[in-house]
Amino acid sequence: MPEKRRSKYDIYADIIEVIVKKGLCSLTRISYGANLPVDRAKETLNFLVAHGFVRETTVGGHRKYRTTKWGLEYLETFKRMQRFFAALKEPVTIRMPEVVLPGRITTGYKDLDGMLFGGIPENYSVVLTAPSCDEKDLLVKRFLEAGPREGQVTFYVTTEAGGVEDLVEKFQSSFFLFVCNPRADVMIKSGPNVFKLKGVENLTDISIALTSAFRRFDELLRGPRRACVGIVSDVLLQHHAVTTRRWLTGLIPDLRSKGFTTLAVMNPQMHPSEEVHAILGLFEGEISIYEKESEKGLEKFLKIRKMYNQRYLESKLPLRKEKMKT
């Protein structure tokens, strides 16, 4: 079921809310945060500026936007009215399709698989954009656990080893852990499927470790393989967009050539919008976890923002930690 079309008043509120959260805001950041094309965002911003909801200023030769008191009052009133209207509505249930298309890799989370008609397309590279939250960690954990359960070789590149110790111990021939942390030795026991690296400073070392692991896994384990690259934000903070793009441009095709479907993880709130956009363009798909005010307060939702040349549901899915754990 497609997501309900936003009214112009919804869009005004979304833009003002992005500016409130980010402070002094550029057009690009507003466009991304409000999920609008740049030309549409600019047109709407001009309207809001003309009516006194937003103020335009110049900083360092660049146009920036900030919310006025009038804009804050509009946002507060809009949210209050949303809560009133929501109280009059019947609860809405999103029905997940039973259709499972061929060539899909389960995410480990049934509701997300339903939105993707069975899972992530094989050999695709997908980025999960999400703030630091339990729901993101649970989604990654479900993706990793589904690999050994499906008999698939699974790679996990991370700065933290918590939560996967059982997988490392139980599936030494198919689950490979790459810990990029100077304290890796005290974080997890050594093993034939554990690679300990000093950090994300030397990207060549990470690539060498992955190449070494390619030679180790049992070639009898045919079929799809999966990789979770959880260090994209760490690499981007350390090396910025140009070097990170160059590294990913080599890594993603290399994993694809070995039969891997890749899920990368990035926190867009940690980086300037131009660096975020520079990285997002490298991936065929994007799944997003984001927060939005609802009648119940601040809630987290999951949405598939793109999946190149593939079918998927465009609905937003409310996330419940209790349900994700089962």
Image (tube, rainbow, N blue to C red):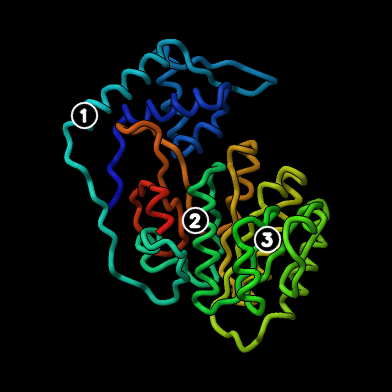
Task: Identify the mark nearer the N-term, 3 or 1.
Answer: 1
Query: Label 3: which residue?
Result: 157
How far across and how far down the image is residue 308, in percent? 47, 61
Residue type at tag 3 = Val
Q: Are marks 3 and 1 in contact (CB under 8 Å)?
A: no
C-alpha separation, residue under disc 1 versus residue under disc 2: 32 Å
How far across and how far down the image is residue 218, in percent? 66, 85
Q: Nearer the viewer, residue 155 or 6?
A: 155
Residue type at tag 1 = Phe
* In the image, residue 9 above or below residue 238: above
Quadrant containing the C terminus is: bottom left
Task: Identify the mark nearer the N-term, 3 or 2.
Answer: 2
Q: Residue at image x 31%, y 37%?
A: 6
Q: Residue at image x 56%, y 61%?
A: 263
Label 2 packing within 10 angstroms: few (<14), some (14-19), many (20+):
some
- Look at discs 1 and 2 and give the one toward the viewer: 2
Q: Is residue 303 left or right of residue 206?
A: left
Label 3 packing within 10 angstroms: few (<14), some (14-19), many (20+):
many
Q: Is residue 190 left or right of residue 36?
A: right
* In the image, residue 172 above or below residue 302: below
Q: Are marks 1 and 2 in contact (CB under 8 Å)?
A: no
Q: Residue at image x 66%, y 51%?
A: 232
* Disc sitting over residue 151 in the figure: none
Query: Label 2: which residue?
Result: 139
Query: Label 1: which residue?
Result: 85
Quadrant containing the N terminus is: bottom left
